[in-house]
Image (cartoon, helix red, strand yellow):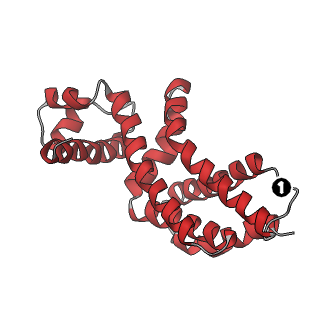
Amino acid sequence: MASKKMEKFERILDAAVKVFAETGYHGSQVSKIAREAGVADGTIYLYFKSKEDILISLFRERLGELVGKFKESAEDSKTAPEALRRICTIHYTELESNPELAYVTQIELRQSSLELRKAIGQTVKPYIQLIEAVLLQGMEEGAFRADLDPKLTRLLIFGGMDETVTSWLISGRKYSLTSQVDKTVEFFLRALRP
């Protein structure tokens, strides 16, 4: 996309995060997203087919950015346990610094239709695969147990971090999410080590 078009696309996604977080996905109107983005209602449809398409694009773009950070950080790590720590740190830090995005990814997704959740699930797949790659690396290094089921374990790790973020949101963000990194990683490593 040309830079002006890309800028407008990003503004619409930023507005959608804010509106979805404030009024919920089902309670949101495309016209409200347009107002928040400072564009005409019809402009939204130049970029997105529907409100559902906005939500899917939001997950694809924002989670895509996060997966890029996770991947870069994991590749820079010398060991699998270090990579796991960095992934957890980024996961918690990014969502704590953007509570509206955290709300949309944690709460709104669970209230969406099965079909919509499946479409959004495709955007999360590279993240799950990255966690699996870290597990396989750890098993190869001997840092993680050789008898792990990488496919199940990747879901348990993702699910553990996911639930920690959800609990933080439900509590009203009364504590620092990033302060939970050490305990989370320690828990994972106790289960993973030989």
Residue 101 image offset from top left, x and y in percent: 40, 51
Which residue is pictured at 53% across the width and 32% down the height?
117
Q: Is residue 130 above or below residue 142?
A: above
Residue nearest the viewer, comparing 63 with 179: 63
Q: Is residue 46 above or below residue 99?
A: above
Q: Quadrant of residue 118?
A: top right
Q: Is residue 40 above or below residue 9?
A: above
Q: Is residue 123 above or below residue 91?
A: above
- The local secondary structure at tag 1 comes to loop
The image shows a total of numbered marks equal to: 1
Q: Amino acid at mark 1?
A: Leu
Query: Would you say residue 173 is visible in this rendering?
Result: no
Query: Would you say residue 166 is visible in this rendering?
Result: yes
Which residue is pictured at 49% across the width and 64% down the height?
72
How dense is the environment of label 1, judged by Cα within 10 Å: few (below 14), some, or many (20 and up)? Answer: some
Residue nearest the viewer, comparing 80 with 163: 80
Q: Which quarter shows the C terminus?
A: bottom right
Q: Which quarter shows the N terminus?
A: top left
Residue 47 image offset from top left, x and y in percent: 23, 31
Residue nearest the viewer, comparing 170 with 109: 109
Which residue is pictured at 33% across the width and 46% down the height?
17
Residue 31 image offset from top left, x and y in percent: 20, 31
Which residue is pictured at 45% across the width and 56% down the height?
68
Q: Furthest residue to the front? A: 140
Residue nearest the viewer, comparing 166 with 185: 185
Q: Quadrant of residue 77?
A: bottom right
Is residue 171 rendered to the left or right of residue 100?
A: right
Name the residue that disc number 1 marks: 148
